[in-house]
Image (cartoon, rainbow, N blue to C red):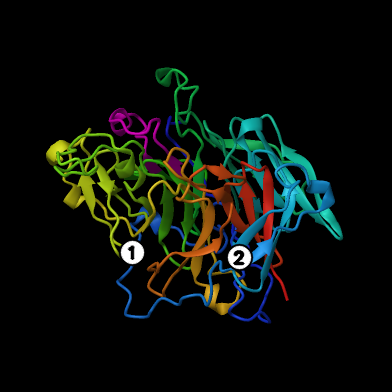
Amino acid sequence: MNMFAMAARRLTKHPLSVLAALSVTCLVLACSGGGGDGSSSSGNSGGEAASAPTPPASGATATPAAGASASATLQVPDALASPPFDTKRSLQVPPGFGIRVWARVGGARFMALAPNGDVLVSVPSEGKIVLLRERAGDTPQVSDFATGLHNPHDMVFHAIAGQTYLYVAESNRISRSVYRSGDTQRADSEVVVDGLPDDSTPELRGRYGHELKNIALGPDDKLYVSIASTCNACTEDTTSDPVRGAIYQYTADGKQGRLFARGIRNAEGLDFIPGTNALWMTVNGRDEIRVPQDIDVDGDGSSDLGKLIASYVDEHPAEIFSVVRDGGNYGWPFCDQEQNASMSNLDATADFEFNRNGANLDCGGITRASKGIRPHAAPLGFSFLHDSNVPAAYRKGAAVALHGCWNCTSLRAGYKVVFFPFDDAGNAGAEIDLVTGFVTDPDARALWGRPVDVIADGRGNLLISDDFAGAVYQLFPSP
């Protein structure tokens, strides 16, 4: 099988329980794991480019009634009250909601909701997938669903010709297994894509900065795999085989692999807007960007062109939340996305190190990112809520986990869960906070949690994984 033959997508979305009784001011966050629901979301038919969303008419995007504006004490069952939950914690959530520690899973990363309501959680650092099964009046039952894996990350449930499969993305391959409702261990699997580059690839000599793989699967059974960059910024990835910093497309069995989009430094989240061919992604932008213009950033009266200045690095480049266009080039490492007032349809600037004066790539001609997120917020898992049973005001949009900046001068970027409302044409509106408060002192760099992924459980609650605290939180409607 071709070295870059890949497969699959991520988490199948399952609709939440109907919460129609809730007021629209109560935001129910329903989304399935790191990727979209193969049974309800749409993929690019026959590899055709996703149709470009049309600009929304004024007021066309429905805006939720409230964001994270109410302080809520984090509820912690006694059995789960080990650090950092041995002291009182509070978070900001939408009015009418509470939040609790639902389960403890060390190193929890991406999640998937099984057809029967079980929740799978990947733990790449331990080579395993954990199963969480809800128990009445108790914390969830925790057991190992699969072990001995090679950096497992993203997972997707997807039905093909009446057969449900579980796709698992390891750092060096994509495999799938037949899933039967209630399974407590993964069935025998087949590798559909092998030989993906990771730190075991000889030419990389153990160095791969973003080796974890993310996947998506559309209703046409096309598979999408993100092969992220090995580095912060480098040109080697743009000429490698397979191209890194890219997304590839395959059939469901891992065949007919082709380069779908490139110039994408690290696409962590992949998902389709349900009922459309529009694949979206969240992308982590580069660090340590040098000043690309002849300007005085630090105020000392001299030009800072080409200098590495912390205040400039903190605010550049914008992170990306965008539709993925077939054949698109999003510019990395030659072009850096720029913020604008609406954080929409972003321009890009030629990178000082790799594209001085636009010598290697015309940044005016690259594929524009649909939406921007604050630099270094580190968007990871996200899920569209369109096919969920959340209140109507929140049923068209995406919930996104922002993992947070690790090397900024303060911790003001990320460390929260946000919501983007969408209009009928597939355009994203302004970002709204959903859950904040994981950072207690941004200047002192004091924090106790880092969101990774967001999914909906089967009863209308939002589950949020946290690899820093080793926890899964449940955001729930509170009468």
Q: Does the magenta stretch include residue 228?
A: yes
Is any atom of residue 223 visible in this view?
Answer: no
Left or right of 355 on screen, residue 174: right
Location of residue 254 in the rendering, given as x and y in whole percent from the top left corner: 49, 41
Tell me the quarter of the image containing the C terminus.
Answer: bottom right
Q: At 71% across and 72% down in the image, what residue appears?
A: 478
Secondary structure at badge 2 equals: strand
Which residue, given by chain and number where applicable, does mark 1 sit on? 51
Q: Is residue 377 above or below residue 61?
A: above
| Residue 82 visible here | yes
Classify mark 1: helix, strand or loop: loop
Q: How crowded is mark 1: few (under 14 residues within 10 Å), some or many (20 or more)?
A: some
Decide: is 166 above or below 24: above
Which disc is residue 93 wearing?
Answer: 2
Residue 344 lies in what quarter of the image? Answer: bottom left
Q: In this view, does 93 lie to the left or right of 204?
A: right
Real-space Cα separation, disc 2 to disc 1, in angstroms: 34 Å
Residue 380: give its label. Answer: none
Q: What residue type is labelled 2?
A: Val
The part of the chain drawn in magenta is 224-247
Q: What residue type is labelled 1?
A: Ser
**Marks 2 and 1, the one that precedes in the sequence:** 1
Residue drawn at point x = 26 percent, y = 37 percent: 290
